[in-house]
Image (cartoon, rainbow, N blue to C red):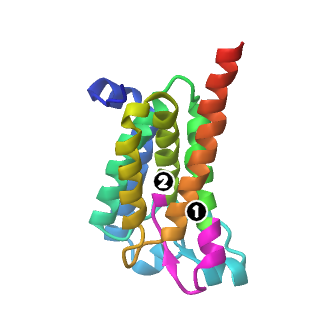
Amino acid sequence: MMVIDIEDLKKAKITITLIFINVLIFFLFNLAAPEEILLIFVQINRNIIENHEIWRLFTSMFFHADPIHLFSNMLALLFFGATVENNTLISKFQYLLIYFVSGLIGNIFSLLLLPLDVISLGASGAIFGLLGVAFVMIATDYQPLLFFSLFYLVFFIAYSFAPGINYWAHLFGLAGGILFGYLFYTRKKKIRFVS
């Protein structure tokens, strides 16, 4: 059964580290630094395209707009991150690959599909990647929970279309996570079963 307890949280060292880094960056940049400094790191498509500030695709994953944005993302990261990180079929390296590549996929599609002057920030694309992997794990091994996980997934996707939310980062981060879930979890299970 997919249940997270305190021992699972203690073992999820990468997830806890990512949460710590996100919270630390929020306090350092949102509360202590001037806004001009924050704007160097968030995703502004015009700056990426015209000034080749490619780092923004990566750094924007660690910045959040306000405490609610930070809290909701870190809560989701705690739950889905611990679920994926503690699964024995997924290595620590694969976990990091899922997180960062899903976030980058979401940000790249945001670059392609959002207007030039939109400011985008947050770990949502990366977290939706973890959500995608968790969904694949449920679909593969916990079919009785599939209806509830589909409902939950639809809720998260519907919420993504609220004003001020980068739904492209969510959708494409999720797509990346589902692909990684197949490659790192379902496919590996099939290979082990056949061997």
Q: Is residue 135 left or right of residue 51?
A: left
- The x, y position of residue 21, in whole percent, is 42, 50
In the drawing, does residue 153 fall left or right of residue 54? left
In the image, the segment drawn in magenta is 108-124
Give the tally of numbered discs. Answer: 2
**View extreme (top): residue:** 195
Circle 2 is placed at which residue position?
Answer: 128
Residue 98, given in percent of the width and then of the height, sits at 59, 44
Q: Amino acid at mark 1?
A: Gly
Position of residue 132 relative to residue 28, above or below, is above
> Which residue corresponds to mark 1?
106
Q: Is residue 141 above or below residue 149?
A: above
Q: Is residue 40 visible?
A: yes
Quadrant location of residue 50?
bottom right
Q: Secondary structure at mark 2?
A: helix
Residue 195 placement: quadrant: top right
